[in-house]
Image (cartoon, rainbow, N blue to C red):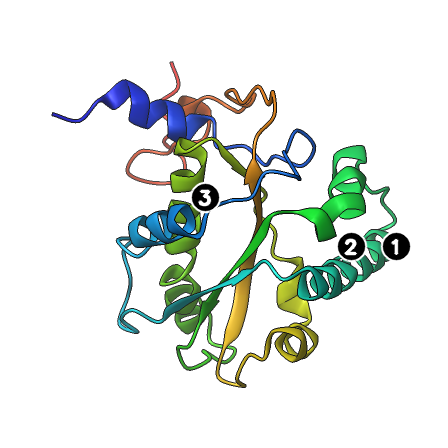
Amino acid sequence: MIDIGSVDTVLATARSVRRRLDFHRPVPKEVILECIDIATQAPTGLGGESWRFVVVMDPDRKRAVAGIYAEVLEELAASRGIAIKPTQKALVARLHEIPAMILVCTVAERPGEDLARQVAYFGSILPAAWSLMLALRARDLGATWTTLLSSRQQEVAAVLDLPDSVVNTVMLPVGYTRGARLKRADRLAAQAVTHWDGWDQTGAE
């Protein structure tokens, strides 16, 4: 029988961990493979098992990827006129030291501009990325959901020798947590965001 309490805890407390990470403790390859085995049980669409996972542990390649990430973050903050959060600054400052980076990629044919095709395309890869983050969380491994590198496909491909057919979507910086207190976030209640049988019916009493 499924332990609903444990499942709910993992689902409700899978937070982005940027600071309280052990940058010196290696993450065993067998643990990463175990988590990827779980991730590939995620639902997928017509494209089938198009997911691929690129695990980066080489110091030089991590440094190169971290450099691209920092550039994109700075450009994004400048274009939107917003300040980079302290937690994001902390991650960027040590991103090159992270024990492992996991890029969730797809080899499915690109969808073009059609919305329905884009939904199907990313809907066949992002569930695997989320399942991977949950599997990591269950093993006391912290990660951060980030998609910034998806805007630099060619640069990332050059660093990691990715073929032209590969698209990187989500990158998870991964390391064991150190004193991180992961808890439920302050979110709107289900009743406030749920509609019944149409948009105007919220079920509010």
Q: Residue furthest bottom?
A: 164
Disc 3 designates what residue? 133
Numbered marks: total:
3
Check contact, mark 3 vs mark 2: CB within 8 A. no
Give the SS element for disc 1.
helix
Disc 1 designates what residue? 78
Which image quadrant for residue 86? top right
Which of discs 3 and 1 lies nearer the camera? The answer is 3
| Residue 74 x, y percent position in the rendering | 84, 55
Give the SS element for disc 3.
helix
* Dot 2 amino acid type: Leu
Q: Mark 3 and mark 1: span between their CA atoms? A: 29 Å
Quadrant where the N terminus sits is top left
What residue is shown at x 40% (from left), y 45% (from top)?
A: 31
Which of discs 2 and 1 lies nearer the camera? The answer is 2
Disc 2 designates what residue? 73
Work out whether mark 3 precedes mark 1 in sequence or the reverse, and give the earlier one. 1
Give the SS element for disc 2.
helix
What residue is shown at x 38% (from left), y 13% (from top)?
A: 205
As displayed, is residue 202 above or below residue 156? above
